[in-house]
Amino acid sequence: MTRPAIRDVDNVDRTARSATVYDEGRTAPLPDEWLKQAPDAPDAIGTAEDGIAGPGSLAERVRRPQTLISFGIAAAILWFFIRRLDIDPAAVWANVRQANPGVYALGFAAFYGSFFLRAHRWRHMLRRAGIDAAHGHPLPSTAGIIEIFLLSWFANCVVPAKLGDAYRSYLLKRDTGASFSTTLGTILAERLIDLTVLFIAMSGMGLVVFGGHLPGKAAQAVMVGSALLALGAVGVVVMWLSRTALERRLPVRVREQYARLHDGVFACLRRPQTFLAISVVIWLGEGLRLFLVAAALGADISVPTAIFVALMSSLLTTLPITPAGLGIVEGAVIVVLTLIGLDTPMAGSIALLDRVIGYWSIVAVGIVLYARRARREVI
């Protein structure tokens, strides 16, 4: 079968994609043998946009050997730190039992309150990229967007390699019909903005806490942040300068996907001031959460220390070795907290209770939301 003629992308009016065959085949569906539809299961990660088949269900990915191995690595890393730092689990548990539940609950509030800010920022980004009711894609309510966020974070907590970002794009596509590639572009822009603010804030707080002599783990986190930020900056520059040349060299089946991805990224990066300001508040909230966890345990740490440790742990969750940095984050937090003078049982208690909020509670909430969404879509 002869494929439909593809117009030169340089002459395509990007604002009129919703009226072309390139927008998910809405007005002129492509032949079935050319465009495979996304799986009907509610748990598919990704989409089959323009012939790209979805990579499989979340439940299937959890059962894959790679995922099980990553959890094994996380357990080994945790065991290494416990043995190396001579942490007494009984002493850690004694600290946890004496924690102030009211102050600890405020830590939960600070963490989950940030999702309202994240949802507001992403809604604004999506509108910038032309994903809104005016363009035929009515967005979910704030509660609906927060649910998508929580499900994507849940995916990051149970599978390695940060697949939650692709899962978030898929969920919005499924709910609104919006382009997967454009949505993913807004998420990439969001990640770059967050990384920029995180790196600057973490480096600044590191200088305040440690002066010019960052300890090994802290220095490694700064190096990771530097590498990620440099990689992101280079990627953006290359995308901006080589758009036309690159699109002409791409296969027809991915050319328009890349164009939508490009549009989504730069629609959000052209005037990023509002997004940067929201990101600052979000990351300060991360520091507040860890400060409240420490306060609930009666540990005396400064606000700059809390911000630095919280941002360092957030940065380490990007490492694809284990799901959401499981094992790596806990070990790094304990090491850094002991370097500022806390005893290892207290440092271990802070790491444990902080990860109960930022990791284990997301797993618990995500299981409920995932099951509810699956049941709703089956019915």
Image: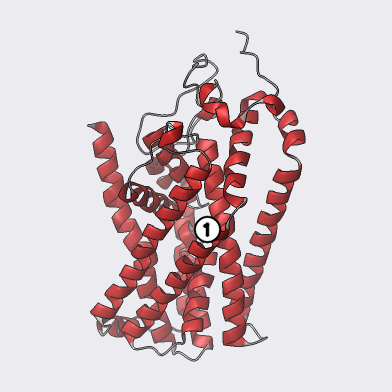
Q: Residue furthest left?
A: 379
Residue at 54% across, 87% down: 339
Q: Residue furthest top?
A: 1
Res. 166 in view: no
Which quarter of the rendered picture does the C terminus lie within?
top left
Q: Residue furthest front?
A: 134
- From what the image shows, is residue 269 above or below residue 184? below
Q: Is residue 98 left or right of residue 212?
A: left
Q: Position of residue 223 (x, y in %)?
A: 66, 69
Number of numbered discs present? Answer: 1
- From what the image shows, is residue 272 above or below residue 129? below
The disc labelled 1 sits on which kind of residue?
A: Phe
Q: Secondary structure at mark 1?
A: helix
Res. 265 in view: yes
- From what the image shows, is residue 121 above or below residue 11? below
Near-viewer residue (314 or 98): 314
Q: Position of residue 63 (x, y in %)?
A: 40, 45
Q: Position of residue 293 (x, y in %)?
A: 36, 78
Q: How is the structure coloured here? A: secondary structure
Which residue corresponds to mark 1? 275
Q: Is residue 346 left or right of residue 182?
A: left
Residue at 57% across, 86% down: 209
Q: Position of residue 306 (x, y in %)?
A: 47, 80
Q: Residues within 10 Å of mark 1 (few under 14, many from 20)?
A: many
Near-viewer residue (49 or 82): 49
Residue at 51% across, 82% down: 304
